[in-house]
Image (cartoon, grey):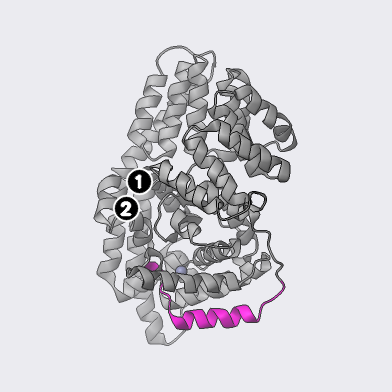
């Protein structure tokens, strides 16, 4: 079995057979059966396999932020909206943020939804961001990719082949594949689809309904649309998002009419969203000094007592990047007294203690929190880091192994496990974990080399070699499929 070749072969053969079916249907003057014809073009399980494969390639190409707090925020928000979309059951979803200042978001095959940090930076409320996610989720649940393939096979056959060709090139040689597209940032969206106006209208309709059901203000979606139009006019260039999701004044008017008829949301507390935005912003700069001055100018606009929580938090994170730990600790401790329940503040305090070589203080901050929230990804990852710095390697590894099934596709979990194993002298295991890290980052050859290295030497684990042999066979099979 070679699933990826199979997918392409299947899509190509479906294009030919579906064209024939469409011709017959048209002549017999009956309406085509949408659902079953879409499943012929791109069956769900094949779409999922394509997406699962594609996300690993993207991880090599794009700066996906693997900070647990960022990934947890965006997935929590995404899954709240998935739960409010009736067509979303039985579909898998995964949300991720790309560290990129441009304004973009896209849905890939298999329910993988990416958002650029630049888009989030431009959202003033959680409802605005939720509007974009709800819209992208609807593109997935309404099978717009499969429907587009179905349309393109009739409308523009060469373009369809070119799109599939790019997928093939990308699978064989990710770098050439991405270079062949219109640039790395837009690559993912370009390779998927430019949505049609009717796709957009449907995604708006379903997106707005799920927004309201999830308790968000649907007018956030409309205000964000208007902001997009303004931004693109102001900057004089088209936003990447607007080139794949065409936006007209008519679409905005339609969405506004829909939102007007839907009520029942409550006013949201925006503080968590604003803290998340600050955390995201702290990953973007290359030079933190001018950013620090910008924060100081902003804070100077307020009296000491009235300084906004999120701005002070963001300032503390920037101070940490500049190793000014004493100042950031003073700010975070003061914020903690004022907002004792904020997870962002508590975790930032722990991170600051770790960064300033004081892991015991971090462990003290996290002990109770971890006990009360077992399985929480953000807390577990920082706690494990503190334990490693405190040389409590066995305890850190036990905790990470237990947590692994929750996040088994995240490369960062294997990175931290490999670090703990290396400090604990478990060298065979280090190669295995590094192999898993590379595998989930899309580097199959690198993974294979690490697994082979892991076969040398001894391990106390009697199942180690047989497990490794299975991993080697698996990755060799995948390499053969792709080439
Ligand atoms: Zn769209």
- The residue beneath circle 2 is 184
Q: Mark 2–mark 1 contact, CB under 8 Å?
A: yes
Q: Position of residue 289 (x, y in %)?
A: 42, 42
Looking at the rendering, which quadrant does residue 370 occupy? top right
Which residue is under mark 1? 61
Query: Hey, which residue is sitting farthest bottom in the picture?
Result: 29
Q: Which residues are magenta?
A: 243-264
Residue 86 forms part of the magenta stretch: no
Element carrying mark 1:
helix
Residue sitting at x 46%, y 50%: 294
Residue 107 spot, x, y in % from top left = 46, 60
Image check: 351 left or right of 449?
right
Question: Mainly helix, strand or loop, the magenta region?
Answer: helix
Point out which mark residue 160 bears. Answer: none
Q: Quadrant of residue 273?
A: bottom right
**Sequence order check: which comes first, mark 2 or mark 1?**
1
SS type, badge 2:
helix
Q: Does the segment drawn in magenta span residue 260?
A: yes
Q: Residue at x 64, y 70 (%)?
A: 217
Q: Quadrant of the N terminus?
A: top left
Task: Say if 313 sits above or below 379 in the image.
Answer: below
* Cα gap from disc 2 to disc 1, whole angstroms: 7 Å
């Amino acid at each position: 079995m070679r699933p990826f070749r199979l997918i392409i072969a299947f899509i190509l053969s479906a294009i030919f057979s579906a064209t024939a079916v469409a011709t017959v249907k048209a002549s017999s003057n009956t309406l085509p059966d949408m659902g079953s014809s879409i499943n012929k073009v791109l069956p769900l399980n094949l779409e999922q396999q394509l997406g699962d494969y594609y996300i690993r390639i993207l991880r090599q190409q794009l700066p996906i932020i693997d900070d647990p707090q960022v990934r947890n925020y965006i997935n929590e928000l995404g899954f709240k909206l998935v739960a409010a979309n009736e067509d979303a059951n039985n579909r898998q979803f995964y949300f991720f943020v790309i560290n990129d200042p441009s304004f973009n978001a896209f849905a890939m095959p298999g329910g993988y939804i990416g958002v650029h940090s630049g888009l989030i930076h431009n959202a003033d409320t959680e409802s605005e961001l939720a509007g974009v996610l709800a819209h992208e989720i609807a593109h997935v649940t309404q099978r717009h990719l499969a429907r587009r393939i179905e349309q393109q096979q009739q409308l523009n056959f060469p373009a369809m082949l070119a799109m599939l060709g790019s997928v093939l090139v990308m699978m064989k040689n990710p770098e050439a594949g991405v270079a062949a597209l219109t640039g790395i940032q837009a690559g993912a969206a370009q390779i998927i689809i430019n949505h049609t106006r009717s796709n957009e209208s449907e995604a708006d309709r379903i997106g707005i309904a799920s927004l309201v059901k999830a308790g968000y203000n649907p007018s956030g979606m409309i205000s964000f649309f208007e902001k997009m139009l303004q931004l693109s006019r102001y900057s004089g260039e088209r936003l990447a998002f607007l080139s794949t999701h065409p936006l007209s004044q008519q679409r905005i008017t339609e969405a506004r009419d829909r939102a007007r008829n839907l009520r029942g949301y409550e006013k949201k507390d925006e503080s968590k969203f604003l803290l998340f935005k600050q955390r995201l912003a702290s990953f973007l700069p290359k030079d933190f000094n001018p950013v620090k001055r910008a924060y100081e100018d902003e804070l100077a606009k307020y009296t000491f007592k009235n300084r906004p929580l999120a701005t002070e938090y963001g300032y503390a994170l920037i101070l940490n990047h500049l190793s000014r730990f004493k100042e950031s600790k003073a700010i975070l401790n003061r914020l903690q007294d004022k907002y004792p329940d904020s997870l962002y503040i508590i975790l930032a305090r722990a991170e600051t203690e770790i960064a300033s070589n004081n892991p015991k203080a971090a462990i003290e901050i996290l002990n109770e929190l971890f006990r009360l929230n077992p399985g929480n990804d953000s807390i577990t990852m920082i706690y494990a880091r503190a334990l490693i710095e405190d040389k409590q390697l066995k305890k850190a590894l036990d905790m990470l192994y237990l947590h692994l099934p929750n996040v088994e596709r995240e490369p960062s979990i294997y990175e931290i496990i490999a670090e703990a194993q290396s400090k604990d002298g478990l060298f065979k295991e280090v190669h295995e974990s590094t192999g898993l890290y590379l595998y989930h980052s899309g580097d199959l050859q690198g993974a294979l080399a690490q697994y082979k290295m892991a076969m040398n030497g001894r391990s106390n684990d009697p199942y180690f070699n047989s497990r490794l042999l299975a991993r080697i066979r698996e990755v060799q099979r995948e390499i053969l499929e792709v080439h």
